[in-house]
């Protein structure tokens, strides 16, 4: 792939180390090759090529009874209304 896209080197030699030109060249090559084009109806060839939908998994887990019950139970406890303040100084400026 590096030979195909001519990316075997890290940019032009004897120049300042700026990746901008290389990135623009790589983006142009990707566009030309159509690597990131959406093709409706296209399916992954193997299962591991499919991206995991972590957002949906998280939402489903949040809406499960156990998670919400655990969240609610860990926040429903009696809280003290008592105030116990220790003085910051003894009144002598210390």
Image (cartoon, helix red, strand yellow):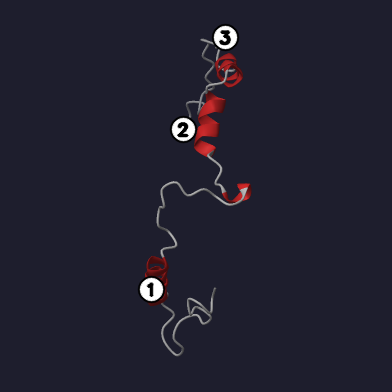
Label 1 crowd bin: few (<14), some (14–19), many (20+), radius 10 Å: few
Residue extending farthest bottom: 14
Decide: is 35 above or below 74: below
Q: Secondary structure at mark 3?
A: loop
- x and y, in percent, of residue 32 in the image: 38, 69
- Which comes sooner in the sequence, label 1 or label 3? 1
Nearer mark to the viewer, of 2 and 1 = 1
Residue 71: quadrant of the picture: top right
Q: Secondary structure at mark 2?
A: loop
Decide: is 82 above or below 89: above
At 40% from the left and 57% from the top, the residue drawn is 37
Relative to 24, 91 lies left or right:
right
- x and y, in percent, of residue 17 in the image: 44, 80
Residue of label 1: 20
At 55% from the left and 50% from the top, the residue drawn is 44
Per the rendering, the mark at residue 78 is 3
């Amino acid at each position: 792939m590096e030979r195909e896209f001519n990316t075997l080197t890290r940019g032009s030699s004897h120049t300042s180390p700026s990746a901008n030109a290389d990135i623009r060249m790589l983006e142009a090559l990707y566009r030309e090759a159509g690597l990131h084009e959406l093709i409706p109806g296209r399916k992954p060839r193997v299962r591991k090529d499919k991206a995991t939908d972590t957002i949906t998994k998280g939402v489903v887990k949040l809406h499960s009874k156990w998670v919400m019950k655990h969240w609610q139970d860990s926040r429903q406890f009696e809280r003290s209304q008592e105030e116990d303040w220790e003085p910051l100084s003894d009144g002598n400026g210390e």
